[in-house]
């Protein structure tokens, strides 16, 4: 292994495109100057396209968790009845944030590795009509599940007047997202995953319904006051010092996504998911999630006849390949492959090939090339099959 060679295949932070790295090395500018106003004026319309919204997408300096906390403090108040749908570690994080602010937290616990069924949400809301806000994770990073946000949103609005807040941190920019059409009231994502940037930015958009609640919400807030960001963004400004270098990078990211087109971005992520899953099946290594529930941005694998931590250590030491482990009760039981953002089918083929060698080194009886060939077959089959609705 070369000393400086590193292959990062975790669900964030993810690799950064070279052109984005170069963009971030530009000389610093004044955050209240005309240059920053022009930068934000170029960025904000394109962010709306990523979110699928006509609303402003607010840019806060902070991690994705900062965006989740901003959603909680702007949309809810003390003793509000809120429902958190927990399909993994990051759904659980939403519940912890709500508890920290004294909300009356209801949780709908879903088996880790399964997506939530909209009928379960319907039943819970009908039995608990006091629920004012529902919190949901779009892609549950800890399990690789993609929850059916559109169907859940329809159900929430059909049976209640609750607002729907969605954590899209590990998938927005990599999967289809239509905030307005689907009826999402608050949508949050972060910079370090499908958005192909280093950690440090979070993006939050709110519907008109959500903004109405925000305006009358007595909850004290300062840095996370989204109304302040909304007002300043009308002037192409931020209320507090923005992460200028990341904004330079964001401008280039949006250019790259626009150049590829969102449709092709979504197809690429689905293809990488299908290649990865086909490889694991060919190697007879069980997957944590069912095909219908699997996220295009991350795959979770649950082996039964080898130690996933041993495999992770071997491929890291041998090749500089970094894979993610399990979280909470899945720690030591699964490993996760991130395939989002600046990642292509070529990267997936490389990752599978390295995994096969790693499996051999830890004593797993596999025929080298089996998983790689399965992934290659999926890729070859995808050529020429690009119907506009096929992703």
Image: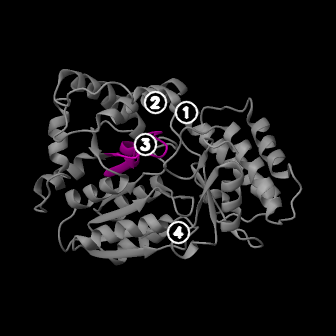
How many angstroms separate mark 3 from mark 2 (CA)? Answer: 10 Å
* Of pointers 1 and 2, the one earlier in the residue sequence: 2
Q: How many marks?
A: 4
- Disc marking residue 20: 2
Asked if disc 1 and disc 4 are in contact, CB closer than 8 Å, the reply is: no
Examine the structure image and report whether residue 263 is included in the region drawn in magenta.
Answer: no
Residues 56 and 31: in front is 31
Mark 1 Cα shell of 10 Å, populated few (<14), some (14-19), many (≥20): some
Residue under the point 27% across and 25% down = 41
User: Disc 1 designates what residue?
Assistant: 263
* Label 3 secondary element: loop
Residue under label 3: 198
Q: Secondary structure at mark 1?
A: helix
On the rendered image, what quadrant is the N terminus found in?
top right
Q: Residues within 10 Å of mark 3 (few under 14, many from 20)?
A: many
The image's mark for residue 327 is 4
**Residue 211 in the image, given as x and y percentages of width and height:** 20, 49
Ranked by sequence position, the earlier of labels 3 and 2 is 2
Quadrant position of residue 97: bottom left
Q: Which residues are magenta?
A: 179-203
Q: Position of residue 380 (x, y in %)?
A: 79, 36
From mark 2 to mark 4, how far is it between C-alphas? 30 Å
Q: Is residue 269 above or below residue 167?
A: above
Circle nearer the N terminus (3, 1): 3
Q: Is residue 167 left or right of residue 288?
A: left
Q: CA distance from mark 3 to mark 1?
A: 24 Å
């Amino acid at each position: 292994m070369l000393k400086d060679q590193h292959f990062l295949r975790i669900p964030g932070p993810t690799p950064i495109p070279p052109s984005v790295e170069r963009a971030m090395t530009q000389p610093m500018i004044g955050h209240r100057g005309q240059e920053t106003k022009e930068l934000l004026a170029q960025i904000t319309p394109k962010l709306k396209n990523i979110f699928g919204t006509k609303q402003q997408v607010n840019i806060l300096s902070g991690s994705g968790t900062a965006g989740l906390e901003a959603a909680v403090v702007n949309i809810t108040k003390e003793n509000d009845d809120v429902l958190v749908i927990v399909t993994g570690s990051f759904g659980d994080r939403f519940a912890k944030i709500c508890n920290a602010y004294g909300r009356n937290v209801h949780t709908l616990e879903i088996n880790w590795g399964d997506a939530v069924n909209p009928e379960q949400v319907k039943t819970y809301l009908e039995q608990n009509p006091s629920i004012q806000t529902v919190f949901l994770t779009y892609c549950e990073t800890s399990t690789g599940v993609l929850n059916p946000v559109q169907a859940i949103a329809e159900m929430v609005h059909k049976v209640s007047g609750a607002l729907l807040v969605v954590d899209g941190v590990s998938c927005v920019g990599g999967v289809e997202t239509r905030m307005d059409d689907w009826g999402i009231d608050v949508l949050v994502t972060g910079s370090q995953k499908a958005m192909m940037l280093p950690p440090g930015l979070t993006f939050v958009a709110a519907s008109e319904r959500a903004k109405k609640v925000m305006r009358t919400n007595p909850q004290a807030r300062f840095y996370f006051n989204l109304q302040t960001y909304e007002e300043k963004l009308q002037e192409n400004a931020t209320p507090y010092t923005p992460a200028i270098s990341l904004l330079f990078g964001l401008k280039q990211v949006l250019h790259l996504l626009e150049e590829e087109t969102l449709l092709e971005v979504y197809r690429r992520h689905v293809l990488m998911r299908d290649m990865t899953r086909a490889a694991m099946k060919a190697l007879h290594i069980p997957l944590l999630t069912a095909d219908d529930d699997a996220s295009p941005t991350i795959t979770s694998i649950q082996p039964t006849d080898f130690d996933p931590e041993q495999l992770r250590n071997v491929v890291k030491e041998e090749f500089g390949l970094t894979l993610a482990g399990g979280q909470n009760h899945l720690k030591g039981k699964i490993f996760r492959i991130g395939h989002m953002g600046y990642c292509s089918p070529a990267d997936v083929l490389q990752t599978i090939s390295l995994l096969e060698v790693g499996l051999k080194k830890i004593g797993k009886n596999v025929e080298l090339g089996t998983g790689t060939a399965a992934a290659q077959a999926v890729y070859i089959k995808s050529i020429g099959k690009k119907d506009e609705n096929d992703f």
